[in-house]
Amino acid sequence: MGTRILFIDDDRDFLGLVRAGLKDRFELLTASGGDEALGILEHEDVSAVVTDVNLGRPAAGGIRMDGIELCRRIVERLPDIPVLVVTAFGSLDTAIAAIRVGAYDFVSKPFEIEALALAIDRAVALRSLREQVKRLEKRDSESRPTGLMGSSLAMHRVLDLVDRIKDNDVTALVTGESGTGKELVARTLHERSRRNRGPFIAINCAALPETLLESELFGHVRGAFTDARAAHAGLFVQANGGTLLLDEIGELPLALQPKLLRALQERRVRPLGGMQEVPFDVRLIAATNRDLEELVEQGRFRDDLLYRVNVVTIELPPLRARGQDVLLLAQHFLSHFAKQMEKNVTSLSPEVADRIQRYSWPGNVRELSNCMERAVALARFEQVVPGDLPDKLFGTQAPIETGDDDEIVPLEEVERRYILRAFEKLGRNKSLTAQTLGVDRKTLYRRLEKWGVSDAKA
């Protein structure tokens, strides 16, 4: 059977029309009142609920409740089931009241069956997203406590590579744009390795001047320089038995690079001002958002050091290239910050989900996390609504990613990318796009709605 939906309305004739219109898309259960609907939900599993706001008198002995109260009770008892409320045309106050008690969305009468079906599709997709987030969070808590999350092919490649090298000590170079989670990958590699009982220490090579950076990495003896009143063990020694992350290694001063190379080759360091070398047992991970090979060509990075740190490269994709991961991460951050702030904020409105998918996220995962923290802080309802988002999300379109030439993706994803690319090239005009691609306009409309694309020209 198809997706199961519970529809509540006290007009039996109207229910019959809805059933006839939706029979090819959903398996429909119906109820004429709140008591009956709650009884059905005790015994039947449904993917979404649609209720009219005006419900008639209950059966003898039943409790009178309108659609808003029914929505509140369903959300309270079964928070994972999205509820859509059907309101009269122009009933904005009623729609706001529905959102306040936890409704996912509202549909105004009179409506076209296709519009109702698309709203239900979005609600069902929300439930699927929530369930996927829970599965990934459970998996992360068991095996990846750092919270790396994603179901895209690009992230599967990253996590597969982490698993393949976790139990040996090869040096790894983590690359990617700023904010993609390079330190999270390094922490995950450490926590899943045999060194996880040892320390994990990270240093940003761009954060300290050359002299202090040398002392921080390799240590110094007392009196090595003016302020060296006591000996200091460097990070290679402090991280003994664990993992050392050299973040932004492309910013490492050229004068320090031979000393780092020798330390990695000999597995020993000589503190500043010292005569004795100190052995260490450390796994090194380097990270950068720069092209190190280009820096080598410019004479700003040693090629022999590049070969030493770049034994295995873990390349992190930008968020804009991770497809549906952006919604998974948004829901994950929403849940995290709602719990942290002790606020009852549970989901993203359809408009917010659309904006999140269309924004280009130049700051990547870090920017998304910041955005969701702000949204939860400002949220007044159980849903995050457009007013909770920064203004910048309403002015930038995400580029349509076509993927790597060697990437094998499902046929449906190939079709999605092709249609969206054509849609953008044709000025986001649905009629022209449908005509050019030779598809029915309603078919194109359904697909664009499914992919969260709005603000298109008719």
Image (cartoon, grey):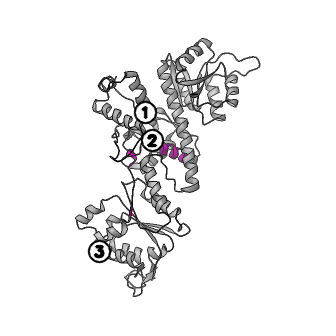
* Secondary structure of the residue carrying numbered label 1: loop
Residue neighbourhood size for the residue with mark 3, other residues' Cα within 10 Å, grouped as few (<14), some (14–19), many (≥20): few
* Secondary structure of the residue carrying numbered label 3: helix
Say if residue 381 shows up in the picture: no
Q: Marks 1 and 2: in contact by CB < 8 Å?
A: no
On screen, residue 201 versus residue 407, left or right, reads right
Name the residue that disc number 2 marks.
324
Question: The residue under label 2 is which amino acid type?
Answer: Gln
Say if residue 112 shows up in the picture: yes
> Which residue occupies the extreme left position in the image?
298
Quadrant that contains the C terminus:
top left
Nearer the viewer's eye, disc 2 or disc 3?
2
| Mark 2 or mark 1, earlier in chain | 2
Q: Residue at x 47, y 54 (%)?
A: 159
Give the magenta part as a residue range. Answer: 312-337
x and y, in percent, of residue 454 in the image: 39, 30
Q: Which mark is residue 452?
A: 1
Q: With respect to residue 116, does 172 lie above or below?
A: below
Q: With respect to residue 426, does 12 lie above or below?
A: above
Question: The residue under label 3 is which amino acid type?
Answer: Ala
How far apart in space, not on screen, are marks 1 and 3 (Cα)?
52 Å
Question: The residue under label 1 is which amino acid type?
Answer: Gly
Q: Marks 3 and 1: in contact by CB < 8 Å?
A: no
Name the residue that disc number 3 marks.
255
Quadrant that contains the N terminus:
top right
